[in-house]
Image (cartoon, rainbow, N blue to C red):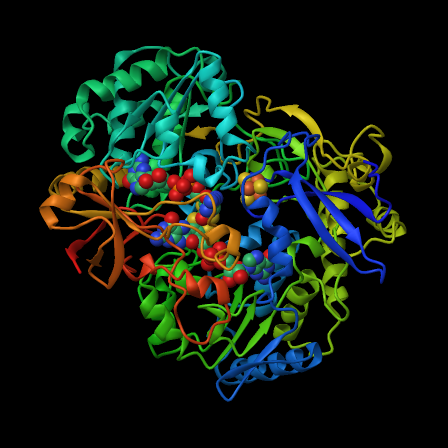
Amino acid sequence: MATADPSTRTAYRTCPLCEAGCGLEITVRTSDDGSEAVQRIRGDRDDVFSHGFICPKGSTLKQLHDDPDRLRRPLIRRDGRHVEATWPEAWAAIEQGLGATIARHGRESIGIYVGNPTAHSLSGMLYSRALLVGVGTRQRFSASTVDQMPRQVASGYVFGSPLAVPVPDLDRTDHLVLLGANPYASNGSMCTAPDFPGRIEAIRARGGKVVVVDPRRSKTAEEADEWVSIRPGSDALLLAAIANVLATDGQGGPGEHVERHLAGLDEFVAAIAPFTPERVAVATGVGPDTIRRMAGEIASAPTAAVYGRIGTTTTEFGSTASWLVDAVNILSGNLDRPGGVMFSTPVAGGPTTNGTPGTGRGFTVGRGHSRVSKHPEVMGEYPVAALAEEILEPGDGQIRAFITLAGNPVLSTPNSAQLDAALDDVEFMVSIDMYLNETTRHADVILPPPSQLQRPHYDVSLLQLAIRNVANYSEAVLPLDDDQPDEWEIIAKVASIAQGRGADADPAEVDEAMIVEMIERATKSAHSNVSGRNAGELLAELDASGRRGPARLVDAMLRTGPFGDAFGSNPDGTSLDDLLEHPHGRDFGALVERLPGVLRTPSGKIELAPEVLIADLDRLEAGIDELESRGLVLVGRRDLRSNNSWMHNIEVLVKGKPRCTLHVHPDDAAYLGLADGRPASITSRVGSVTAPVEVTDSIRPGVVSLPHGWGHDVAGTSLRVASEHAGVNSNILSDHAALDPLSGTSVLNGIPVTVIAG
Ligand SMILES: Nc1nc2c(c(=O)[nH]1)N[C@H]1C(S)=C(S)[C@@H](COP(=O)(O)OP(=O)(O)OC[C@H]3O[C@@H](n4cnc5c(=O)[nH]c(N)nc54)[C@H](O)[C@@H]3O)O[C@H]1N2
Ligand SMILES: Nc1nc2c(c(=O)[nH]1)N[C@H]1C(S)=C(S)[C@@H](COP(=O)(O)OP(=O)(O)OC[C@H]3O[C@@H](n4cnc5c(=O)[nH]c(N)nc54)[C@H](O)[C@@H]3O)O[C@H]1N2
Ligand code: SF4
Ligand SMILES: [Mo]
């Protein structure tokens, strides 16, 4: 778009802060000295997916870029203090530190934690695997086990791939049931849909119904037709009862399209027989009539989509709840059907488009067990709840050096006081991160990536879960600072150093190896669009563009993807050049039926009754008594202006009324002697914190709520704004021993607590 002022230009970029991936219109002003600065950020009205929608965080990419606390140069810890260093000094320190640990204790002594923004960073997504391989340790941890891992485990068993995750077809459904999700605050998760709230409103405007299952009357519940108040941790029971009603009432059924590909229906129906609405009523707090009505409405709506998110996954039955979400969608005839739940066809390809359509090796866990507590490996990692003990417990394989990539586990993971203390014991720590914060203050070397505006972007991971098949590539808006390596170069460099290639190793070699591997795999695959082609020729064609790094990899992915130009044999197909001509993105349409091609189970069927999950129903049934008798429990919540733990240094996002308050129902407040605005002390099995009380009838009696990601009042950080709005760290209360055994995911909702005034 042309602007009147010759000293400004307009750039378009996808916002990388959350899963919605909104299009931004960014005005950049050039000063007389030639330097550029962002003048304004607003929603891109021409974006093919977000149509101008933006939340209050989107425009703060400018403040994030300008934040004086954001690191521009590496920090090295000398005599207990972090001081600025040059990049060569940082590489040398890493070579020495990692090298010494590997020489003394072997590669298993290095632990790695990969945090959430990795999924929002093109470099992080593409090169983190190289880092894991380069370090060569099984001590891998990530934010997945405080988040969506149960959803992926369920997909792994049922559909054969942990990335075969059905998403609610928001724009066409007549009936939406959301469990444990608050997209009015979060903007959606494991379901990429910019302006999720607007899409919910559209369901109601076209005469559909929206039901929210949540122990809190969240903003989403307020905007819905119905709020079903549930006792925390009991969604699996509610879903089992709904599935039971659907199976026994004989309405509808999975439908012919799904039945042809379905295995285990009878076994499933038999296994859920004990979960009648009456049996689960007390434990869930949802009456039998309501459960029957919910099931009836799901079955009789022209189309319906049931969707479960963080309130269902971060519980002790997270995997089973996620599976039962699928079961309800299957039994009501809503899987793989417009208006129901559907699978994306990711334009840049992915596990559901690569390989042999309709069959695969399936999903297994337990290729190894964690050293101390013997947790099974899941998707190549161990539960982050076990990270502290792996550092603290002496013995072979004890973690002695630690690497974090875009993670703040000291605030984000359970029993964080224990982890915070454990990190003091680590001999050498490297963090790839842009802040000196609660976690990175333990690091010997901090390597800052360029700001979000200085990097290109493509949502490689989140567009695999999008409610439309869209593609959008953004070039970096601002140039790199002098000497500043790009994030992919930092990650590849650390990978090379860990591999033993020295501080002078060239990250370009890692990049080169990756593109060669990608193209060779595609040309060797019988099912790719470049099957049998000459890999050397394709590589030469990619190289001719002059691109390297993430841009070249994305080009290759797009061209070999389901809508790709196949290096010329599909001339109308897409490529990076094509996306560069479409700065507002390209829309490849609504989701389409993907059965059976999406399946990667060995049987080529949807496995409705996987042994592991059927067996877990016994644990679920055995847990009913305990759920019925639970006292006060703690749940989390998100705020629209917050983003996990790391955007609290942006003044416009934290100003105003403090957000880190304990929500308490008026009845509980009266009983416990708590007053609005007064402090309360909250204690769990593992810790205690004090937070101001906010009395509100938006929360279910017997439940209190505290947001996570706060607690910025620790020494040794450099977060000037955040430390003035410190709040308390709710994960001091979450118990490292409480997890969903199937996925290793922590219980972050439904934590037993006591609360007293003061
Ligand atoms: N503004 C903002 N947006 C974000 C983030 C953020 O921190 N801030 N984080 C991003 C990330 S990493 C993620 S994973 C997503 C998460 O996105 P969502 O899953 O939508 O997360 P929340 O907004 O926390 O909503 C979870 C809801 O579950 C409810 N809940 C708690 N326990 C239970 C339970 O046992 N059962 C049921 N049914 N409900 C329960 C809570 O009250 C809460 O309303 O958000 C992303 N977007
Ligand atoms: N009690 C409770 N705990 C929770 C949750 C909850 O609902 N309740 N939610 C959980 C969820 S869903 C998640 S995803 C996790 C998040 O857990 P984490 O991923 O560990 O934490 P974040 O707060 O996202 O911190 C991200 C870190 O990455 C840095 N960073 C930001 N952008 C970039 C980048 O582009 N590159 C690099 N290299 N670094 C970057 C930030 O400075 C920060 O240090 O928290 C979990 N913890
Ligand atoms: S909802 Fe907000 S934070 Fe998320 S992508 Fe859109 S503008 Fe960015
Ligand atoms: Mo998350």
Taking the spot 35% from the left edge, 53% from the top edge, the residue there is: 660
Taking the spot 47% from the left edge, 18% from the top edge, the residue there is: 203
Of residues 650 and 507, the one drawn nearer to the viewer in this rendering: 650
Report whether residue 619 is seen: yes
Instruction: Tell me the quarter of the picture where residue 78 sits.
Output: bottom right
Q: Residue furthest right?
A: 544
Q: Position of residue 191 (x, y in %)?
A: 51, 35
Q: Position of residue 115 (x, y in %)?
A: 50, 57
Q: Position of residue 642 (x, y in %)?
A: 46, 49
Instruction: Locate the C terminus by quadrant.
Output: bottom left
Of residues 488 and 186, the one drawn nearer to the viewer in this rendering: 186
Q: Residue furthest bottom?
A: 79
On screen, residue 329 versus residue 483, left or right, reads: left
Instruction: Tell me the quarter of the picture where residue 83 sits.
Output: bottom right
Of residues 567 and 89, the one drawn nearer to the viewer in this rendering: 89
Taking the spot 85% from the left edge, 63% from the top edge, the residue there is: 33
Report whether residue 260 is seen: no
